Image: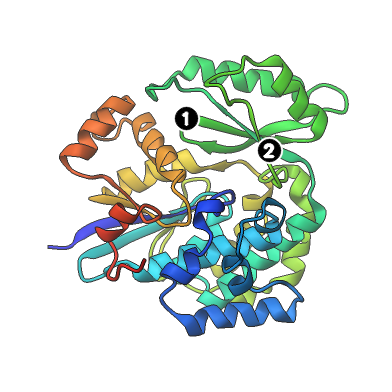
Amino acid sequence: MKKTAVVICPGRGTYNKSELGYLKRHFPDPALLESFDALRRDEGQPTLAELDGAQTFSIAQHTRGDNASALIYAATLGDFLSIDRDEIEIVAVTGNSMGWYSALACAGALSPENGFRVANTMGTLMQRALIGGQLVYPFVDENWMAQPERRQTLLAKVDEIDARADHLLGLSIALGGMLVLAGNEAGLKAFEQEVEPVQQRFPMRLGNHAAFHTALQAPVAKQGREQLPSELFRQPNLPLIDGRGAIWWPDATPTEALRNYTLGAQVTETYDFTQAITIAAREFAPDLFIVTGPGTTLGGAVAQSLILARWLGMDSKTDFQAQHDDKPLLAAMGMAEQRKTVSKGVTE
């Protein structure tokens, strides 16, 4: 019997030094990859083959929005195409932040080429504008136990800073046990100075990230709507769970509404990844959550989201690990050993 799975597509910040060469190692369709590079050449951008095949990883080059979005989209789609469909039935697709564009293509609401066009265009527009920034700060403890009062206190601090003159700060992404905050430099700096440093690395500023999922991105969303026509969007083949936890169903999706969300609220309002995972678990009850590559960082946020949802009665990291050891709940395709359990071909 096939295992059922929800596929989860990662967002920005997941193609890093250890991912260099990921497309060369794993992408299953050279002709499709070349079609992506043809679009990049037309735009005067370095090709994915050049970026992925570079001798060394460059933070300045590889993490720019116009390059990172294209690399991540291609790596995600390649992994999705590599899932062994003889063994695994994909019941829904979701993603984190720019992973929404990848999810649209994986679910069939955009063709692979049009999905690349959307991801590349939005990444390029955001890089050109580079409005504001992002930081990350946890509200759960190191055993990932929920602390709703602490979360409420932190969000009250965010609201208080945002209310100050010339300060902008808001919740960008609800990412499991993490708050991803976005705003202008004054807002971000005030938060960094006024909260307690924890786990020796938080609050952590995210390099080359703009104030994603806030009203500051309204000009980028407007440009996206001007450049990406309605005709790109179509009915999905698989259910899609968006950044509000809403489900877009095959044969019942108003495609204009899907475009309006993708190039509107998805860009300018909080992305609730935690809610998306909660809905994925409760509505589809999959045997497995598959996190495509690149990278390995999103698995923790998925696990934390399941714990916050009290999925299978879990309420801590210890519970999740015990459950996962008994019957694996999560397969991260960016990890070689876990990739083998869901991929129809292992390439090294």
Residue type pointed to by label 1: Gly
Foreground: 238 or 176?
176
Residue type pointed to by label 2: Gln
Tell me, what colour scheme is on the image?
A: rainbow
Name which residue lies at 76% across and 21% down: 190
Q: Is residue 95 left or right of residue 217?
A: left
Tag 1 secondary structure: loop
Q: Is residue 264 left or right of residue 138?
A: right
Q: Is residue 312 left or right of residue 68?
A: left
Residue 169: x percent and y percent? Answer: 73, 31
The answer to whether residue 216 shows anywhere in this view is yes
Residue 3: x percent and y percent? Answer: 20, 58
Residue 256: x percent and y percent? Answer: 60, 68
Do callouts 2 and 1 mark residues in contact (Cβ within 8 Å)? no
Disc nearer the start of the sequence (2/1): 2
Give the alpha-carbon distance from disc 2 to disc 1, as whole Å. 16 Å
Quadrant holding the N terminus: bottom left
Q: Label 2 belongs to which residue? A: 134
Tag 2 secondary structure: strand
Name which residue lies at 41% across and 68% down: 26
Decide: is 182 above or below 231: above
Circle 2 packing at 10 Å, graded few (<14), some (14-19), many (20+), is many
Decide: is 162 above or below 243: above
Residue 305: x percent and y percent? Answer: 40, 36
Q: Is residue 168 left or right of residue 298?
A: right
Decide: is 276 above or below 188: below
Q: Label 1 belongs to which residue? A: 177
**Residue furthest out toward the right:** 166
**Residue furthest out toward the bottom:** 31
Quadrant holding the C terminus: bottom left
Circle 1 packing at 10 Å, graded few (<14), some (14-19), many (20+), is many
